[in-house]
Image (cartoon, rainbow, N blue to C red):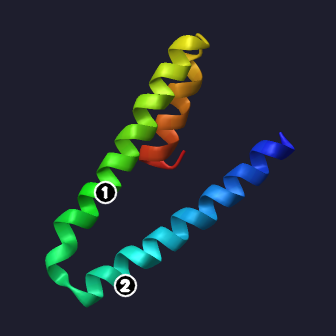
Amino acid sequence: MEEMRKRFEEASKILRQTVDISFAEYAKDKSTKNEIVKLWQETINDFLQYAVKMSEKHQAKDLYKSIVRTLIFGK
């Protein structure tokens, strides 16, 4: 569990930095909005597709559903 905690901390830091970069890029050039959103969509979709694959591989759809529910509803 400790390794997972550390990885989540690293991922959170990277995501926060990426949010900061996203807003900085948008502030420089508002026309980049669609491109920024597309990059976020592609990344989130890639993550969700990978999570689906792993949940099937490990026969853990209940864990996947709980993760997605948390992402959507924060619970």
For the point 28% across and 88% down, the residue is 27
Of the 4 image quadrants, the one containing the N terminus is top right
What is the residue that sits farthest to the left in this orientation? Answer: 31
Left or right: where 5 falls relative to 50: right
Residue 21, x across and y down, in percent: 42, 77
Q: How many labels does the image show?
A: 2
**Quadrant hosting residue 35:** bottom left
Residue 70, x across and y down, in percent: 52, 42
Question: Which residue is labeled 2 in the image?
Answer: 24
Circle 1 SS class: helix
Residue 17 against residue 67 in the figure, above or below: below
Residue 26 against residue 57 in the figure, above or below: below
Q: Which amino acid does label 1 sit on?
A: Leu
Residue 6, x across and y down, in percent: 78, 53
Question: Which residue is labeled 1 in the image?
Answer: 39
Residue 53 against residue 9 in the figure, above or below: above
Left or right: where 34 falls relative to 60: left
Q: Which of marks 2 and 1 is nearer the N terminus?
A: 2
For the point 77% across and 49% down, the residue is 5
Compare residues 19 and 70 and report the one nearer the observer: 19
Residue 61, x across and y down, in percent: 53, 17
What is the residue that sits farthest to the bottom in this orientation? Answer: 28
As measured in the structure, the alpha-carbon distance from the residue carrying label 2 to the one carrying label 1 is 15 Å
Left or right: where 33 falls relative to 74: left
Q: What residue type is labelled 2?
A: Ala
Q: Do residues under tags 2 and 1 come within 8 Å of each other at their CB atoms?
A: no
Of the 4 image quadrants, the one containing the C terminus is top right
Q: Residue 2 carries which label?
A: none
Classify mark 1: residues with Cα within 10 Å, few (<14), some (14-19) or many (20+). few
Circle 2 SS class: helix
Classify mark 2: residues with Cα within 10 Å, few (<14), some (14-19) or many (20+). few
